Image: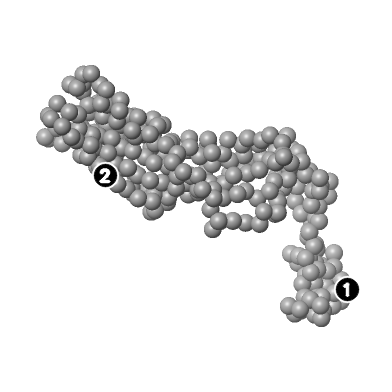
């Protein structure tokens, strides 16, 4: 009923882009003289926090080095909601050229907010502070990520990723043999756009633009003074061709046509 099949992978691209922001976080250990003795890249995986905490509780060897299990980061898509504040007309369209040079008609996208939750799990609070300090300065409170939403027509947009809030929990309970887990939770909102199906354009290319200038804002009574006209040069130019534009001004006060760059007869 809604139409033909289409899938632009926009939500998938948004999830991947969000995860890419945090896939190169490191923590370092120093000795008393201030020399770096170890550098650890913090593992990042997609999944809920409860899954990773359950895995920690089921570890048989509680004496394993912390570098193998902790610190660790996980993220997941937590919500999806329509954003009415970024709404545009549902009937407006624009034209684009695909990779094969064909003209396509595209309706303006629908704004949606994608919620994400990033969990940072550590044993030592200093590890968490190192990770947090490598993230927070980039969000004031948003960080723009450029996504190729529809690669076939080259539709790229900047997607703001907004840091909404931060919370902290200490999962330590039990005796000294129980593993302690400090968890920082960061909630984000990615303001993305969803596109509908891409249709073939039946309207053809725009090959002439004409603008009339009036002496008054009321065009019903005002006298038209100047008309500006622009056409491709050559007129037979197609999308992807290297072409310029021919521009002229028609002055209705004297009936002459002038060049836009110099006040001379054409």
Q: CA distance from mark 2 to mark 1?
A: 75 Å
Quadrant in which the N terminus is drawn:
top right
Can residue 125 be seen here? yes
As drawn, the residue found furthest toward the top would be 60
Observer-nearest residue: 167 or 42? 167
As drawn, the residue found furthest toward the right would be 255
Residue under the point 44% across and 41% down = 78
Q: Position of residue 253 (x, y in %)?
A: 84, 78
Q: Which mark is residue 255?
A: 1
Residue under the point 37% across and 40% down = 118
Which is more foreground, mark 2 or mark 1? 2
Can residue 130 be seen here? no
Q: Is residue 222 above or below residue 210?
A: below
Is disc 1 placed on a helix, strand or loop? loop
Q: Position of residue 147 (x, y in %)?
A: 54, 41
Answer with the quarter of the image where residue 177 lies.
top left
Residue on which disc 2 sits = 168
Binning the other alpha carbons within 10 Å of mark 1 as few (below 14), some (14 to 19) or many (20 upward) gives few
């Amino acid at each position: 009923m809604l139409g033909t099949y289409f899938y632009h992978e926009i939500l998938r691209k948004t999830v991947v882009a969000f995860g890419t922001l945090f896939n190169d976080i490191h923590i370092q250990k120093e000795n008393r003289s201030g020399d770096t003795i170890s550098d650890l890249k913090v593992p990042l995986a997609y999944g809920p926090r409860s899954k990773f905490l359950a895995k920690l509780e089921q570890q048989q060897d509680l004496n394993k080095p912390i570098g193998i299990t902790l610190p660790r980061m996980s993220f997941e898509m937590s919500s999806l909601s329509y954003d009415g504040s970024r709404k545009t007309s549902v009937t407006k369209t624009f034209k684009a050229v695909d990779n094969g040079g064909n003209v396509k008609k595209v309706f303006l996208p629908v704004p949606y907010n994608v919620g994400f939750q990033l969990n940072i799990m550590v044993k030592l609070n200093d590890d968490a502070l190192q990770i947090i300090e490598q993230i927070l300065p980039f969000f004031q409170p948003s960080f723009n990520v450029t996504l190729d939403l529809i690669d076939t027509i080259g539709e790229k947009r900047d997607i703001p990723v907004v840091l909404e809030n931060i919370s902290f929990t200490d999962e330590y309970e039990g005796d000294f043999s129980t593993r302690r887990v400090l968890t920082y939770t960061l909630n984000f909102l990615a303001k993305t756009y969803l596109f509908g199906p891409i249709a073939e354009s039946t309207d053809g290319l725009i090959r002439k633009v004409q603008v009339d200038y009036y002496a008054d804002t009321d065009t019903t009574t005002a006298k038209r003074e100047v008309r500006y006209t622009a056409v491709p040069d050559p007129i037979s130019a197609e999308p992807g061709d290297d072409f310029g534009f021919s521009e002229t001004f028609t002055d209705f006060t004297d009936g002459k046509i002038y060049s836009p760059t110099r006040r001379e007869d054409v």
